Amino acid sequence: MVELMRRRGLPWLLLLAALAAPFLMSGYDLNLLARFMAMAILSLGLVLLWGHGGILSLGQGLFFGLGGYAIAMHMKLADLPGGSLPDFMVWTGRTALPGWWAPFASPAFALLAVLLLPALAGALFAWSMVRRRIGGTYFAIITQALALAFATFLISRQEVTGGFNGLTGFQSLFGWQLADQKVGRGLYWLTLALLCLGFIGIRALLASRFGTLLGAMRDGENRMRFLGYDPAPYRMVAFGIAAFLAGLSGALFTLHAGVISPAMVGVVPSIEMVILVAVGGRMSPAGAIFGTIAVCYARDFISSSFPDLWLYLLGALFIAVVTLLPGGLAGLVRQRRA
Amino acid sequence: MTTATADLLLAVDGVTVDYSGFKALDGFSLTLGRRETRVVIGPNGAGKSTLCDCIIGRVRPSAGRILLRGEDITQKPEHAIVGAGICRKFQAPGVLAALSVAQNLALAARRDRRWWKALGTGMSAAEQETVAAVLAEIDLAGRREVLAGTLSHGEKQWLEIGMVVATGAELLLLDEPTAGMGPAETSRTAALIRRLAQSRSVLVIDHDMRFVEELGAQVTVMHQGRFLFQGGIADVRADAQVAQVYLGSHR
Ligand SMILES: Nc1ncnc2c1ncn2[C@@H]1O[C@H](COP(=O)(O)OP(=O)(O)O)[C@@H](O)[C@H]1O
Ligand SMILES: [Mg+2]
């Protein structure tokens, strides 16, 4: 009984602690936590897509990047006195703003771009794949190639993308000064609120018939097809939702980190995103959130003391999870309870 | 067989399936009336499963047509063929192991398959009714909430027959429904199929002669992708050509 109450109470206790964090932590630590929470929003999408849909995407960095760059472009333009160019464009000798940059000056356009662009791009890409019944390893490799192509484009078109250094040096968002402690706290709470909403939404979706059907199409694609289901639209929607969450995650991450660059959207970060979820438990939204935050803290700690070690450790961690703990941390908790 | 056009449900018309030179079906034809039960037999490799594959759109024939109620369905997408009223039970049971018996039937019983209609929870009244009726029919009402993966082999076969029925299909294709069953289970399956056949058309594939006898239906014999013989079970038993094909394949 006490055990049951403890279990029931734990999520609320954690939520309370998370809400109070701005009063308990230094600004630096709060900023770190906020970044990791933003990453956890992306992980929720992978629980739906990979865990329950059985569709492995090694290209979530692309959608993360679309969201991140959309908000970053807006902030670069908003900070400028009218008519002048972002700093990196001046350095690379550009004399005019590219046409596709211009609409991002509008806050409404930038916000819509964050919310719609990754989702639509994801849904469109997924439709072109699942319609032709491309799945499994081929699908994963193609998503990987997408992330690679995106990062390569960003690096090679430095005069319009900021190149290898990405976009950075933001001052304000929608008129709020980012350096202001109050704004930092507000963005932290916003991130927490969106993470909670994402968690509730994904749980509800998984509990709905949509979740059941998506899982059934993963386990028995043939049976479902010959019961009269076409898996393609279901998979497209799952991919679109995962891309939407990745875009949101990228935008929030960019706000907290103060930078978005190719190094955060390419092949390695895309694979890292999958490992975060594998460690936490790809079937479990709660597991994915905790796995993501825990591994991100570990990375921060290890890569600041031993920068070269992290990727090896990450690889080893992945192998350990896949071979010893297929359900991730969430699977371990479930075993303990059973 | 002389089936009046009005009563004709399915017509397989000169269908050929070519696996890089090897013809699994070779100009095969068959017609099936409304509410007719037909048994298809033939030695291993005769092309019986391939025939089912063609009808449900899993394999596309290189020649010939398949008509349902006179409409050509040969090139329709798989889900549209199910929507038109044909559903198949595969040789190896394909129930969804991680879902309960009732959930398995519920997803077969859904009529509206558009994704945004799946965002709710629970079942509609009509789905609940179908699930309850099918559960009673396949005699698994007592195992409603059990995970399908934990059912015995025979129960899985019945559940999958139930799923095929729950789609509301007018034509059931049952590919070796008694595979792996003992004599008692086989008899129960025959009784189940006879009950189901009262209100729909059924095409059954099997080799078990006692089971075929219990079904009491017309038998079509296939050999090497071609039509060999058709008639009652007694005629089949008496036919010298059929006997030779079966003896030849049991060397
Ligand atoms: N995908 C395939 N590729 C090549 N040959 C196949 C394929 N599927 C079936 N066959 C061959 O077609 C023939 C008919 O198979 P099948 O329809 O399964 O026979 P039955 O169900 O009557 O035992 C067999 O000889 C089999 O080996
Ligand atoms: Mg067969």
Image: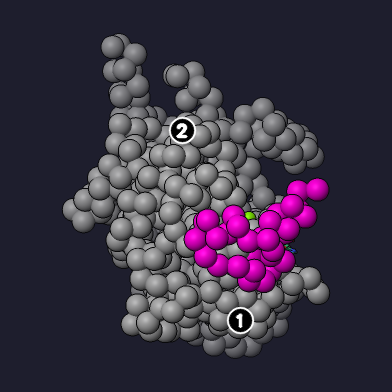
Residue drawn 30% across the image and 31% down it:
B142
Q: Judge left or right: residue A199 versus residue A131.
A: left
Specify the segment rendered in magenta: B222-251
- Kindly identify which chain the residue marked by label 1 belongs to: B
User: Of all residues shown, which one is farthest toward the left?
Assistant: B125
Residue drawn 31% across the image and 17% down it:
A4
User: Of all residues shown, which one is farthest toward the top?
Assistant: A2
Q: Name the foreground residue: B23 vs B243.
A: B243
Instruction: Answer yes or no: are tags 1 and 2 on the same subunit.
Output: yes
User: Please, is residue B10 above or below residue A248 in the view?
Assistant: below
Residue B167 in which image quadrant: bottom left
Q: Are marks 1 and 2 in contact (CB under 8 Å)?
A: no
Percent coordinates x, y for residue A157 in the rendering: 70, 76
Percent coordinates x, y for residue A144 in the rendering: 69, 60
Residue drawn 39% across the image and 51% down it:
B193
Residue at image mark 1? B14
Say what secondary structure mark 1 lies in. strand
Percent coordinates x, y for residue A6 in the rendering: 33, 18
Q: Which amino acid does label 1 sit on?
A: Gly
- Kindly identify which chain the residue marked by label 2 belongs to: B
- Residue B16 shows up from this direction: yes
